[in-house]
Image: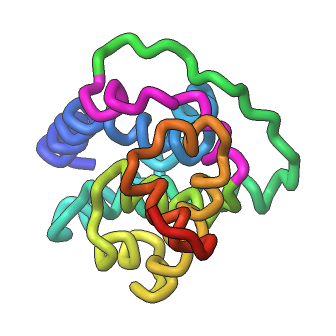
Amino acid sequence: MQAEQEDRFQEFVRARWSRLVRTAYLLTGDVHHAEDLTQTALAKAYRSWRRISRSDNPEAYVRRMLVSCNSDRFRKRRVVEALTAAPPERAGRDETAGRVEERGSLMAGLAQLPPKQRAVVVLRYWEDLSEAEVAEVLGCSQGTVKSQASKGLAKLRMQPGLAAGRTASGSREQARAQGGTR
C-alpha cells in the first residue's frame, strides 16, 4: 500500500474506531469479541483499502464487513455463547447509550435475538441508519429490514426490564393490541 493510502487508512481507523467497536459490541454482546471483530473487519478493509476508499461511503462498507465477519464467526464455530446481563463499564461517555436506563435488559434482549434481527435492530435503531442503508449494509431488501426490525422489536418489548420502562403511549398500544382501550 502506498504511503498516502496507508495514511488515509490510519486516519479512517482513528476517526471511526470507537464507533465501529460500539457497533461490533452491540452485534456480539462482548467487548473482547467486539474488538476482535473490528480488527478482523479492518484487516480485510486494509487489504482492499484502495477500492474501498473510492466508494461513496467507506464507513458503510466497513460496517457491512463487520456484520459479515460476525455472521462468519457463527458459521465457523457453531458455539452457543453466554452473554452477561450487564455490559462492561465504558471508558468514555456516550450520549446515546447514556439515555438507555435499561441497558442490562436491552443487552439481554439483544443477546436473545437471532443474528440477522440483532444486526437490523442495531443498525436501524442504534446506528440510526435508514431502512435503505441497512438493506444495503446487510445485502437484503428493505422489506426484509422492515420485517426483521418488527420481529426484533416485538421480542425486545417482551423483555420484562424493557417493558417496565415504556411510556404511557406504549401501554396504550399494548392495550389496543390486547383488545382493551386506555
Up-down: is 161 above or below 142? above
Residue 95 lies, in percent from the top left, at 25, 27
Q: As drawn, is 54 to the left or to the right of 110?
A: left
Q: As drawn, is 151 to the left or to the right of 26?
A: right
- Looking at the image, which residue is at 48% across and 59% down? 121
Up-down: is 117 above or below 164? below
Is residue 149 rendered magenta in the image?
no
Q: Which image quadrant is residue 51 in?
A: bottom left
Is residue 100 rendered magenta in the image?
yes
Q: Residues in magenta?
A: 94-112
Pick the residue in front: 106 or 80.
106
* Residue at the extreme left: 4
Q: As drawn, is 63 to the left or to the right of 66?
A: left
Q: Which image quadrant is residue 137 in?
A: bottom left
Image quadrant occupied by the C terminus: bottom left
Res 17 seen here: no
- Looking at the image, which residue is at 15% across and 69% down? 56
Q: Which image quadrant is residue 104 in?
A: top right
**What secondary structure do most residues of the magenta stretch adopt?**
helix
Pick the residue in front: 164 or 9.
164
Residue 38 lies, in percent from the top left, at 48, 40
- Looking at the image, which residue is at 67% across and 40% down? 160
Pick the residue in front: 15 or 54.
15
Residue 151 lies, in percent from the top left, at 60, 71
- Looking at the image, which residue is at 54% across and 64% down? 175
Label count reads 0
Res 11 seen here: yes
